[in-house]
Image: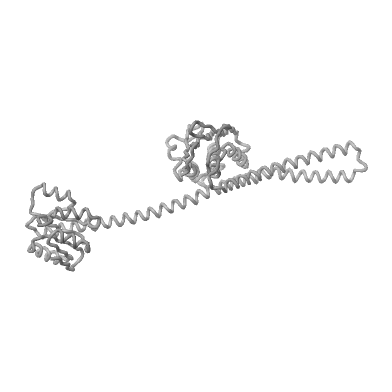
Amino acid sequence: MNTIKTGGEGVILIVDDNATNLGVLFDYLKNAAFRVLVAQHGKAALELLQEARPDLILLDVLMPEMDGFETCKHLKENPATRDIPVIFMTALTETVDKVRGFELGAVDYVTKPLQHEEVLARVNTHLTLGRLKQHLIRKNEELAAVNRNLAHLVQEKTRQLVQQEKTATIGRMIQGIVHNMKTPLAVIANSNLVITKKIEKLSAGLSSTPEPEIAELLNSIAQDSALVEKAHGQIMQIVNNLMLKSRMDQSADAKPVNLNSLLKQEFDFLNADPQFKHKTEKELQLDERLPELPLVYSDIAQVVENLINNALDAMWQSENRRLGVRTRQDSSHVYIDISDTGSGIPPDKLEAIFDPFFTTKPPKGEENEGEPTGTGLGLHTCLELLKPFRGEIRVESEVGKGSTFTVVLPKQVHKG
């Protein structure tokens, strides 16, 4: 006898081979506003469950063909039915039988002869628990979706901020380039004015001016012309460095990179920063036997820029500003050491400095006069850029004495 009756909220499946017990319990639960499914043995219940999904199963233990224990085992092995709560109905009162039922996945049991009020109380309790469980699952799924969206938003915002960090670096370099070009341009302008006046003077008095004075004037013009040529060369060097860096930065492919040449070019480019050029003692020690490594030039250049800029920022209040950059190698790795005589990093903050948005610098607008600001993305960006090449960064720091950041790159680079 397989019957579906429609009543109130909640669907209960009763499985019992005793038709009298089945009928009485069916009527009781129906009157309690439940919708009721019934089956008279385990196999019939499993067949019924191929089409129906009750909220709870009342399962008799002692049945022919397939007892309640075996039926429950099949229910819990099926992904489609394993989460349906099962309450055993049994005349077995031995602890071992109860334990076996719980081990098979039952949530509760009621003993025969059944006390209908007790059955109803247990049914309501486990239906409530089931609804709460489903509600919790839905909320967890919603929370997981929100977390995924939030992770995506954070990732996108981080990408935007990283790009802003790069743009800000370029902006600082452009300001420095303009600053560095002002002096040679002023030399050119002033020298041209002086040369023009001297030529006018020479032309006006050529017939009456003694030869020694003409020679002296021509020599002066030649010196001024040399100043113009020197200033022109300085400007062309700045422009060439900028064009070279721009060309290198546009490449996103891994190609053999000479790290020593890269560091020299970065030093030339960073000379556009007056603080780097005029206020910092620099030492560049390069291992000339360093092998070329297959890297993305712009990525490694960005790492070097970030680390050098961090070193300069750390020394903003230092009386003795010394920047050291060194390359070295061993049998398996190449190293770039970037050292400063800055404020150093407290031990309790060392592990956090690579976390995104962690910074010891104040945000823009909250800094003291001349104090560097930060977004907390510079070092995190460095790590992300090094990951594809199995690179890492090591740090040694002492408060009040300075820090050394070491870029570690394997000689056998497998980009991944």
Q: Percent x, y for residue 203?
A: 88, 45
Query: Is 103 positioned to the left or the right of 218 in the image?
Result: left
Residue 245 location, quadrant? top right
Relative depth, front residue between 187 and 14: 14
> Among all residues in the image, which is located at the extreme bottom?
6
Quadrant of the image for the N terminus? bottom left
Q: Residue at x 85, y 46 (%)?
A: 200
Relative depth, front residue between 242 and 166: 242
In the rendered image, is residue 410 in sight? yes
Residue 325 location, quadrant? top right
How many numbered discs, if any?
0
In the rendered image, is residue 359 in sight? no
For residue 342, above or below residue 96: above
Q: Percent x, y for residue 191?
A: 77, 43
> Among all residues in the image, which is located at the extreme front?
65
Query: Is 318 positioned to the left or the right of 147 in the image?
Result: right
Q: How did the renderer colour the structure? A: one colour
Relative depth, front residue between 279 and 70: 70
Residue 185 location, quadrant? top right
Query: Is 52 positioned to the left or the right of 271 in the image?
Result: left
Relative depth, front residue between 50 and 117: 50
Q: Percent x, y for residue 271?
A: 62, 40
